């Protein structure tokens, strides 16, 4: 079952759950609308990798909002955002640990010839970590490993 089909099935379940499924329903509808808008704009059907990209973008938006809500001492919004993130986590692949990302970066650097540049490493690492790791963390680990290699 593709991610889009899974989202549709879960949307139906959330509708049947009525009151208890309201939060999940609103989050799934938001993601479904983002998928539809992207399909219309790009004039093509999205595959699971594209859907994961959209889900990761939605998750990132909520992470950024969470930080702001915590700064503003808005516990009600913090709780709601965390609940929305829990719904999104069901559809995202298991996040990579820092060690797994570092290993991916080291392996990518090993395949390249000196002098190794940041952009070359990122071209190899980003497709492997997309949707599974935060881009800022990946970037910082690439910088650390490049500092070790290039001195």
Image (tube, grey):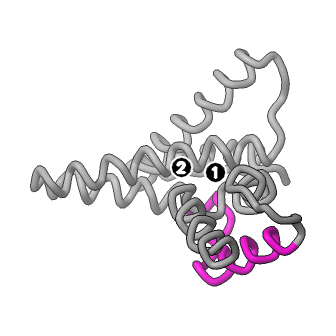
- List x then y, in percent, for residue 91: 64, 58
Asked whether disc 1 touches disc 2, contact meaning CB atoms under 8 Å apart, the reply is yes
Numbered label attached to residue 14: 2
- List x then y, in percent, for residue 64: 35, 49
> Which residue ends up furthest to the left in the rendered image?
73
Query: Quadrant location of residue 44?
Result: top right
Look at mark 1 in the image and give the residue it sits on.
10
Figure quadrant of the N terminus: bottom right
The residue at the point 81 percent across, 76 percent down is 107
Q: Nearer the viewer, residue 116 or 11?
A: 116
Query: Quadrant location of residue 8?
Result: top right
Magenta stretch secondary structure, dominant: helix
Whether 68 is drawn above or below 145: the answer is: above
Q: Nearer the viewer, residue 114 or 58?
A: 114
The residue at the point 77 percent across, 19 percent down is 42
Whether 48 is drawn above or below 118: the answer is: above
Q: Nearer the viewer, residue 104 or 64?
A: 104
The residue at the point 81 percent across, 68 percent down is 108
Numbered label attached to residue 130: none
The residue at the point 18 percent across, 57 percent down is 70
Query: Which residues lie in the magenta part?
Result: 89-110
- List x then y, in percent, for residue 5: 77, 45
Mark 1 crowdedness (10 Å alpha carbons): few <14, some 14-19, many ≥20: some
Figure quadrant of the C terminus: bottom right
Which secondary structure lies at badge 2? helix
Label 1 vs label 2: CA separation? 6 Å
Q: Is residue 16 left or right of residue 145?
A: left
Q: Nearer the viewer, residue 130 or 40?
A: 130
Residue 96 on the magenta segment? yes
Whether 22 is drawn above or below 108: the answer is: above
């Amino acid at each position: 079952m593709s991610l889009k089909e899974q989202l549709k099935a879960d949307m139906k379940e959330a509708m049947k759950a009525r009151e208890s499924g309201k939060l999940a329903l609103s989050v799934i509808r938001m993601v479904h609308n983002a998928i539809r808008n992207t399909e219309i704009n790009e004039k093509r059907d999205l595959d699971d990798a594209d859907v994961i990209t959209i889900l990761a973008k939605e998750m990132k938006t909520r992470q950024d909002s969470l930080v702001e809500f915590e700064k503003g001492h808005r516990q009600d919004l913090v709780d709601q955002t965390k609940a929305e993130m829990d719904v999104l986590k069901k559809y995202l692949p298991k996040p990579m640990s820092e060690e797994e990302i570092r290993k991916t970066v080291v392996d990518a650097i090993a395949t390249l010839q000196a002098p190794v540049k940041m952009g070359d490493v990122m071209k190899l690492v980003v497709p492997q970590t997309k949707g599974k790791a935060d881009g800022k963390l990946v970037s910082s680990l690439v910088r650390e490993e490049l500092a070790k290699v290039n001195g």
